[in-house]
Amino acid sequence: MAAHLSYGKVNLNILREAARKDLREFLDKCAGSKAIVWDEYLTGPFGLIAQYSLLKEHEVEKMFTLKSGKLPNADVKNIIFFVRPRLELMDIIAKNVQRYDKIPTSSFRLDFHILFVPRRSMLCEQRLKDQGVLGSFINMEEYILDLIPYDGDLLSMEYESAFRECYLENDQTSLYHTAKGLMTLQALYGTIPQIYGKGDCARHVANMMLRMKREFAGIQNQILPVFDTLLLLDRNVDLLTPLATQLTYEGLIDEIYGINNGYVKLPPEKFAQMKQGEASKDLPTEPKKLQLNSAEELYAEIRDKNFNAVGAALSKKAKIISAAFEERHNAKTVGEIKQFVSQLPHMQAARSSLANHTSIAELVKDITTSEAFFDSLTVEQEFMTGVDTDKVNTYIEDCIAQKDPLIKILRLVCMQSVCNNGLKQKVLDYYKREILQTYGYEHILTLHNLEKVGLLKPQTSSRNNYPTIRKTLKLWMEDANEQNPNDISYVYSGYAPLSIRLTQVLARPGWRSIEEVLKMLPGPHFEERQQLPSGLHKKRQQGENRTTLVFFLGGVTYAEIAALRFLSQMEDSGMEYIIATTKLINGTTWIKTLMEGISWSPK
């Protein structure tokens, strides 16, 4: 059992166990020994649901990555393909099966099966039929893995192309999966009585949920609701936040090294235990892979802090651990020694955790203390406070001239555009010309995509609403307290994420107080109520917090998650937040999904 999933107000282990049960049932349908052939993208999300030990219990003996060509030799009875419903993957599977069928009949016949994640697709089945292999499969089923529990308060669909599909390709598949995922959640945790939303995609998801509920009108959900409110937020309501550099510990790890499915890969040098006189050639060359979640006590404590407060927290922890180890000298009686020994494993784990995070903090600090990082951050903060957003920025010009990474340039130019409600045509044309001449004309499609989704656009009206939105919602707070924060703006050292301010205002005093600002932001805002069967209305205890599920359609950053956790912990908020999203993103991974001519699937 993943204990860290059940610590919070909502026990997300229930969702994980439901997913594990479905997986076990499918594996048991394929009687005999098995080998799984994985669509590589699925191995990370599946790792959060079921470790290899569970698969082994159900006769899974081998695992391979899906590749074109011949299947590896596996002395098993069943080959199961775990794949997303993608046509290019069907072509690879077809070649795998055809290669096997050409082998002269042996005494041992293989049975083939496909498990589509998260949905079966008629197009894929037709492609297999066209390739002449559809009849080779004994079982073809779908495994509905919509929302994956990442932590005690965090769910993600890991649907990497959701934003691109919705805003660039006008494809609403991800919204259907979202609505289905929310219906699954309600089946396990009770009907959510209140639904609020902002944005076109939010409206679509709410409509689909209400329609699905009507279709099941005869079936009453008799579970006492765990969630009081669902808030659906479109990513395009707040395009600014993901573009900004996150300044929390977890956010910076993601910005610099990338966190994938709860794991980060780091340069190994800082983690090598060098003994005196040992040659440096023996140092490890493989990246150090670490799991990051609240199961690790220290990480849970420091991940949401502004990075400037992490050093002091680690130093304090080091003193506590050191003092705990010193206690052994005071243990005189057998009972005291026995008690010390029983605490030893926990103390050693804490010491190892401290060593790891001290090394990570040093790696991050090397970046954050560099001149390049400071200069870039200064420009970001100037844009957010409305300084010179209407003219060509000299820092961006210099970065292009030095051929800095294109993603860095795009993030800054898009940020300037968003903070200025579009750029003057001559400024926009200048940036485009400079980018294409420096980085290559193939990026013209990328620039077109950024324009289409509203990140980089010409100014169509003389009125820039951003300053009004910034002032009304207090998006910029001077002198944000990074050490002992009293406002969510600490996660970006001054900038309060717009998405989280909307969430905060909804809880108190309510969106009616900011009607004018809501009209300036894209898409409709709405409220829906879902009827509960009689007897299921919650009787709230004195001082009991309400629980809101905030669902980000198109991605959420770790800094936004930190801000929501901060609101949950505020004594007077009266609200606890659970976070759900189509994908955990940062500015780089988000912009990459909108680029053409590069492979943007995760490594």
Image (cartoon, rainbow, N blue to C red):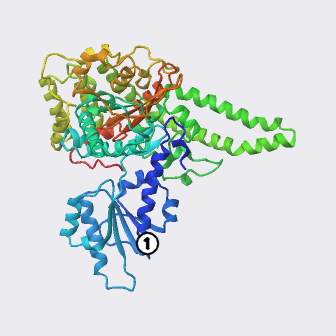
Residue nearer the viewer, 459 or 180 = 180
Q: Position of residue 385 (x, y in %)?
A: 31, 17
Crowding near the residue tagged with mark 1, few <14, some 14–19, many ≥20 C-alpha atoms within 10 Å: few
Q: Is residue 360 above or below residue 419?
A: below
According to the picture, the residue beneath numbered tag 1 turns out to be 31
What percent of the width, then of the height, locates residue 10? Answer: 48, 37
Q: Is residue 405 visible?
A: no
Find residue 172 and report its image quarter: top left
Q: Regarding mark 1 in the picture, which secondary structure is present there? A: loop
Q: Amino acid at mark 1?
A: Ala
Up the image or down, 90 lies above or below 105; here it is above
Question: 143 left or right of 17?
Answer: left
Q: Position of residue 37 (x, y in %)?
A: 38, 65
Q: Based on the displayed image, in which of its 4 quarters is residue 550 positioned?
A: top left
**Residue 32 shows in this picture:** yes
Residue at 79% from the left image edge and 38% from the top image edge: 328
To which quarter of the image does residue 325 belong?
top right
Q: Is residue 169 left or right of residue 404?
A: left
